[in-house]
């Protein structure tokens, strides 16, 4: 690869979104709402992804009124992580629905085992 001053190579570490849907750029601390299901989140680890709940794109929190939805419970106080670990969300208002990031269902993060205090 030949790089000249003032030019830069594309970032080889970023994973582009391939799903073709609307991608959103998430930043840490940003508040999101799933208008389909009513769950609300705070981004704890961001990135550029296609994030949906029940097939509807998750939006930045404003004055949207959520609609009723079916699906698995989204649990208050739990963290959800994308399959590749690129995005992490903290649920601050429970709701219903299936969170999907870049075409794969987001996983509920388990509790971390802390070292003993001996």
Image (tube, grey):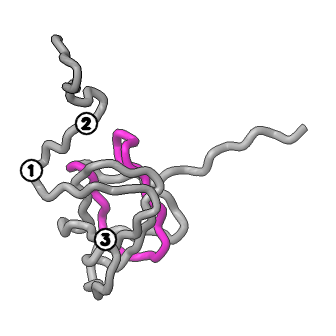
Horizontal relation, residue 111 to residue 3: left or right:
right
Q: Position of residue 94 (x, y in %)?
A: 45, 75
Sequence-first disc among 3 and 1: 1
Disc 1 and disc 2: Cα gap in Å? 14 Å
Q: Are marks 1 and 2 in contact (CB under 8 Å)?
A: no
| 1 in relation to 69, above or below | above
Residue 69 spot, x, y in % from top left = 27, 79
Query: Farthest left residue?
Result: 20
Q: Can you name the residue that lies furthest to the front here?
A: 5
Residue 118 versus residue 99 in the image, above or below: above
| Mark number, residue 60 | 3
Q: Position of residue 108 (x, y in %)?
A: 45, 54
Q: What is the span of residues highlighted in magenta in the rendered image?
A: 81-103
Identify the element where label 3 is drawn: strand
Mark 2 secondary-structure assignment: loop
Q: Earlier in the sequence, mark 1 or mark 2?
A: 2
Reading the image, the residue beneath label 2 is 15
Q: Residue at point 19% right, 25% down?
A: 7
- Provide residue 83's location: percent of width, then percent of height: 34, 43
Outermost residue, right direction?
118
Q: Find residue 50 and report its image quarter.
A: bottom left
């Amino acid at each position: 690869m030949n790089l000249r001053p003032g030019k830069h190579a594309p970032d080889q570490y970023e994973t582009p979104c391939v799903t073709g849907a609307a991608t959103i750029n998430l930043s840490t601390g940003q508040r999101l709402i799933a208008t389909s299901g009513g769950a609300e989140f705070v981004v704890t680890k961001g990135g550029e992804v296609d994030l949906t709940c029940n097939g509807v794109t998750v939006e930045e929190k404003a004055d949207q009124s959520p609609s009723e939805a079916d699906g698995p419970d989204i649990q208050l106080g739990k963290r959800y992580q994308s399959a590749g670990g690129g995005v992490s969300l903290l649920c601050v208002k429970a709701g219903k629905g299936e969170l999907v990031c870049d075409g794969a269902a987001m996983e509920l993060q388990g509790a971390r085992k802390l070292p003993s205090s001996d």
